[in-house]
Image: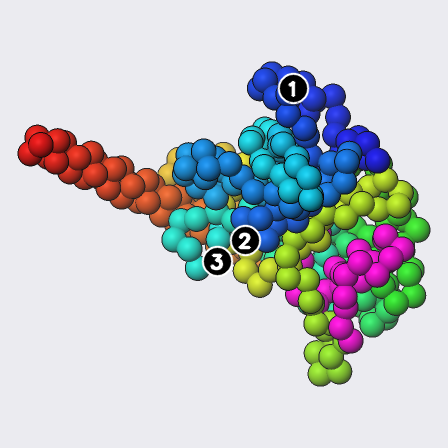
Amino acid sequence: MTLADLGYNDKIEKSRIEHGLEDFEIGRVVSEHKERYIIKTINGEFEAEITGNMRFTARKREDFPAVGDWVALTTYELGFAIIHKILPRFSILQRQAVGEYGAVQIIATNIDYAFLVQAADRDFNINRLERYLTICNSSKVKPIIILTKTDLIDELQLNEILNSIKTRIANVPVFPISNETKKGYEVINSIIEKGKTYCMLGSSGVGKSSLLNNLSGKTLMKTDAISQSTNKGKHVTSHRALIMLENGGILIDNPGMREVGIADAASGLETTFDRIVSLAKHCKFKDCTHTLENGCSILEAVDKGEIDKASYENYLKMQREKVHFESTIEEKRKRDKEFGKMVKNYKKDINKKK
């Protein structure tokens, strides 16, 4: 195996040289377990920890390694390694951390494409698809929509779903598949590129583990039987993992996500809802909220049926979330600054007493 098999390329090598890391070994984070990491290198896999200096200087979650990261490390016998540096990331998939005030959770890094996986029966939710798209567009990750469990619906229902996606989402490829019959897998396999990294995003029980097993040709992830009451499989993936596929692609599986809070999503919203954003430029008032004002181009387009009303409402909801998240981040920074100032003054007082 070579580093290229893991997705290494000339751009990453150039970055390594620019940051003076030639004397270190290079590896990629394939899984994470409570600040202990499994790193894959050309010499095998190593269990690794970060240096004390990295831990001391880290100010936020993004300063720690994540699945998909390229890291500079020193390896030792018995499969142990120390991580000294994280190489610059070219993409970061992230969302609002669940239950944490103004915090971000990294889903995965250095991703080229994201498989947005939804079951075509009961899980299908186009509002959630737009959320996933916003996360991808914010990170400059190319989205690909995959509809699983198409064997559980008829052709008429499938066409209705495909038309609803086409109405609200433009220029994103959609691939219907069945994990049971393998229908649609030939196309999926044909689009996976050697050396490119793919990440799966989706709720629990939509068939991500089955998709991974079928694409790899191996039982890499355990899957549970489909519930008779909900038609949903019980998702058993509990952590993120980077998997090498036989055709040369690299796939990252993720635990199911109940909540998809957007973070740092200004550019993502503009791309996902580009028609709405472009119309906003023609509103009568510059500070138009697009909710009640006369002369609002967006409201006029919704009334005429030119903009889907549900998509418009989803945009407003995510816009409010973005504003709230940004305000919580600003409040957190203000508190941290005040706390830092208090500590500094306390140390001054202590030194004066000495």
Give the residue type that dot 3 points to. Answer: Val
Q: What residue type is labelled 1?
A: Glu
What residue sits 59% from the left and 17% below the top? 20
Please identify the quadrant where the C terminus is shown: top left
Q: Which of marks 2 and 3 is in front?
A: 2
Q: Which of marks 3 and 1 is nearer the N terminus?
A: 1
Residue at image coords 65%, 19% = 22
Q: Nearer the N terminus, badge 2 or badge 1?
A: 1
Q: Front-most of 186 and 239?
A: 239
Residue 80 visible: yes
Residue bearing the label numbered 3: 98
In the figure, residue 154 lies in which quadrant?
bottom right
Q: Label 1 belongs to which residue?
A: 22
Between the residue at mark 2 and the residue at mark 1, the CA separation in whole angstroms equals: 28 Å
Q: How far apart are marks 3 and 1 (CA)?
A: 38 Å
Looking at this view, name the residue that lies furthest to the front: 77
Query: In what element is the residue under mark 1?
Result: loop
The span from disc 2 to disc 3 (Cα, nearest Å) is: 17 Å
Q: Is residue 182 above or below residue 153?
A: above
Say which label, 2 or 3, has the lower sequence index: 2
Q: Name the residue under label 2.
A: 34
Residue 1 picture quarter: top right
Taking the image as shown, residue 245 lies to the left or right of residue 252, namely right
Q: What stretch is highlighted in magenta?
A: 199-225
Crowd class of label 1 (few under 14; some 14 to 19; many from 20; radius 10 Å): few
Q: Position of residue 221 (x, y in %)?
A: 77, 61
- Type of amino acid at the residue the image marks with label 2: Lys
Query: Camera-side residue: 133 or 238?
Result: 238
Q: How crowded is mark 2: few (under 14 residues within 10 Å), some or many (20 or more)?
A: few
